[in-house]
Amino acid sequence: MKSVYDFLIEPIGKVYDNSINVDNKKLVLNTSIEKHKFVNNRAKVIAVPLAFNTSIEIGDEIIVHHNIFRRYYDTKGKEKNSSKFFKNNLYFCQIDQIYLYKKSDTWKSFGDRCFIMPFKNDNDLELEKEKKLIGTLKYGNKSLEDAGINESDVVGFKPNREFEFIINNDRLYCMKSNDIVIKYEQQANQTEYNPSWAQSS
């Protein structure tokens, strides 16, 4: 069974990630299907598309867009699967809805996606816990490498690009290569900001 243009995937775990572990106890964070932040985005590849040749193979673990598994209520108030649902816990996934894939226990960015970890705001006079529009490049890609921007570099990014994911217990922001606007050469004594709840997922 193969699709022409889409990957065929299944969720790893439940469709929604609604809880975290705190002191060996389960804490429920959400009971609503509307909130996209709690939709599972980890998946296993069941089939690859015929139209594309990528480095992703059957059996690989991938990170995908939350709308693939997200459920909703129709006009009659009945709960429905997303439009990507196929059958038997299988879903279609477009190539631009994949952000990371895992090879040999190592996450690799896919396409023009990259992931940034923000810095802690060390200004005691401000309420914000993290610095705006700056962070460490955790997962880069070839186009950034060609521009001389590599993983662990300190970079600045465009506003409103804070698309949040939890990867290996790190809260990271997913964005595209052209969202990175500057590489900082001198940024000493910066502390990465990773909230404690991200490490409990």
Image (cartoon, rainbow, N blue to C red):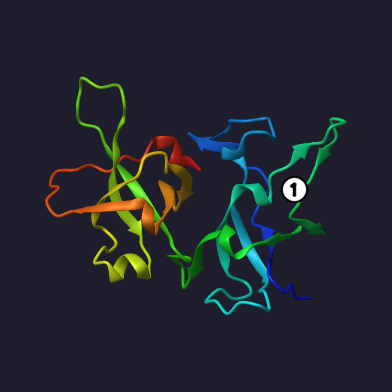
Q: Is residue 155 above or below residue 92?
A: above
Q: Viewed as shown, does residue 69 lie left or right of 127?
A: right
For the point 46% across and 52% down, which residue is it?
167
Identify residue for label 1. Answer: 82
Q: Quadrant of residue 3?
A: bottom right
**Residue closest to the eye, 201 or 96:** 96
Counting from the top left corner in percent of width and height, residue 118 is at 32, 43
Q: Quadrant of residue 146?
A: bottom left
Numbered label tally: 1
Q: Viewed as shown, does residue 200 lie left or right of 39?
A: left
For the point 39% across and 54% down, which residue is it?
115
Counting from the top left corner in percent of width and height, residue 185 is at 14, 55
For the point 28% across and 46% down, which residue is it?
135
Q: Viewed as shown, does residue 85 lie left or right of 19?
A: right
**Residue closest to the eye, 100 or 199:** 100
The local crowd at label 1, few if under 14, some if 14 to 19, many if 20 or more residues have their Cα within 10 Å, is some
Q: Residue furthest right?
A: 76
Kind of residue sitting beneath label 1? Ser
Counting from the top left corner in percent of width and height, residue 107 is at 44, 64
Counting from the top left corner in percent of width and height, residue 19 is at 59, 36
Q: Is residue 165 above or below residue 50?
A: above
Q: Quadrant of residue 151?
A: bottom left
Local SS, label 1: loop
For the point 68% across and 63% down, which residue is it?
9
Give the quadrant of the N terminus: bottom right
